[in-house]
Amino acid sequence: MKLFCVGCGPGDPELLTVRAVNLIKSAEVIFAPTAREGKPSIALSVVEKYIDRSTKTVSLVFPMVKDRESLKDYWKRNAEEIAGTVRSGKNVVYLTVGDPALYSTWIYIHRELKRNHKDIEVEIVPGIASMFAIAAKAGISLAEGEETVAIVPACYDMERVRRTATACDTVIFLKDGRYFDSVIEMLGESGFPDGADIAIAQDISAEKGEILEIKKLSDLLGKKGPTEKYFSIMVAKKNARD
Ligand SMILES: C[S@@+](CC[C@H](N)C(=O)[O-])C[C@H]1O[C@@H](n2cnc3c(N)ncnc32)[C@H](O)[C@@H]1O
């Protein structure tokens, strides 16, 4: 009775591990997260071409709200459905975008399984996280030598973000692109020099629709950024070396 959690990378179906592809191809049931009923799952769309016609796909709703109390019922119900399917003897995969260990719905499912479904064995297959995809596309390093890196969900506490930006050499902002403009202004006030490198991307590695912009901080201050979407990522590097 084993469940496989598979990280399906940043969007390009070529950017999956061999193990991920093999598990997806042989799955009888694939579960994947979606933000609301009827909305196609991004993770499922990434791996579409590997899914056998006989495989059942199930989108599980994880609403995009911050209130953990109201989310707990969804985590519990979704984990019960997954555990029940694994117990029925089926070959089951749970999909997540990027890597399962980074801001993923899997983290909550896994916790539920460990607490309430201890009979379910789990194997996690890592995936390429969006921060590595943007670094590759932009041709930048995330850290070298003694540099420190922070990963920040940009839509949360701006004062905390400011302290993090002051303390670290590279800051990676995930989640909501609508906050990037105010984050850029804040970087200017937190010790990031005018020449700092800023890479911003939306739908990186997607087959269509990818946006990628690499600029100096001074070019972006006071301007409106290129992305407002949820699937946006920004890397700010204090020490531009090139
Ligand atoms: C819930 S988090 C999941 C992160 C994911 N587990 C990872 O390893 O990258 C979703 C956020 O990751 C970032 N993200 C994931 N895939 C992306 C992509 N293809 N392009 C741009 N940003 C992406 C965005 O910041 C998005 O809001």
Image: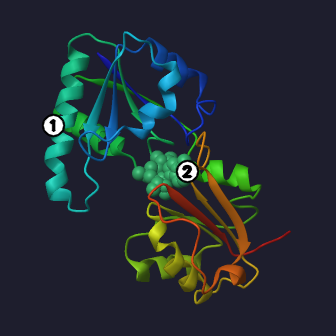
Is the CB of the residue bearing disc 2 within 8 angstroms of ligand 1?
yes
Asked whether residue 5 is in view, the answer is yes
Horizontal and vertical percent for residue 73? 13, 46
Amino acid at pointer 1? Arg
Which dot marks residue 203? 2
* Crowd tier of the residue under label 1, counting other residues whose Cα lies within 10 Å: few below 14, some 14–19, many 20 or above: some
**Is residue 87 toward the left or the right of residue 235 in the image?**
left
Horizontal and vertical percent for residue 100? 44, 41
In the picture, which quadrant includes the C terminus? bottom right
Which dot marks residue 182? none
Task: Return the residue found at the far bottom.
Answer: 189
Q: Which residue is mark 1?
A: 77
| Secondary structure of the residue carrying numbered label 1 | helix
Label 1 and label 2: CA atoms lie apart by: 30 Å
**Is residue 82 toward the left or the right of residue 77 in the image?**
right
Residue found 21% across the figure and 35% down from its top: 78
Q: How is the image coloured?
A: rainbow
Q: Quadrant of residue 89?
A: top left
Residue closer to the observer: 224 or 73:
224
Is the CB of the residue bearing disc 1 within 8 angstroms of ligand 1?
no
Horizontal and vertical percent for residue 216? 73, 76
* Crowd tier of the residue under label 2, counting other residues whose Cα lies within 10 Å: few below 14, some 14–19, many 20 or above: many
Asked whether residue 118 is in view, the answer is no
Residue found 41% across the figure and 12% down from its top: 53
Q: Quadrant of residue 5?
A: top left
Residue closer to the observer: 42 or 20:
42
Amino acid at pointer 2? Asp
Residue closer to the observer: 36 or 1:
36
Which callout, 1 or 2, points to the residue nearer the camera? 2
Residue found 20% across the figure and 38% down from its top: 115
Mark 1 and mark 2 residues within 8 Å of each other at the beta carbon = no
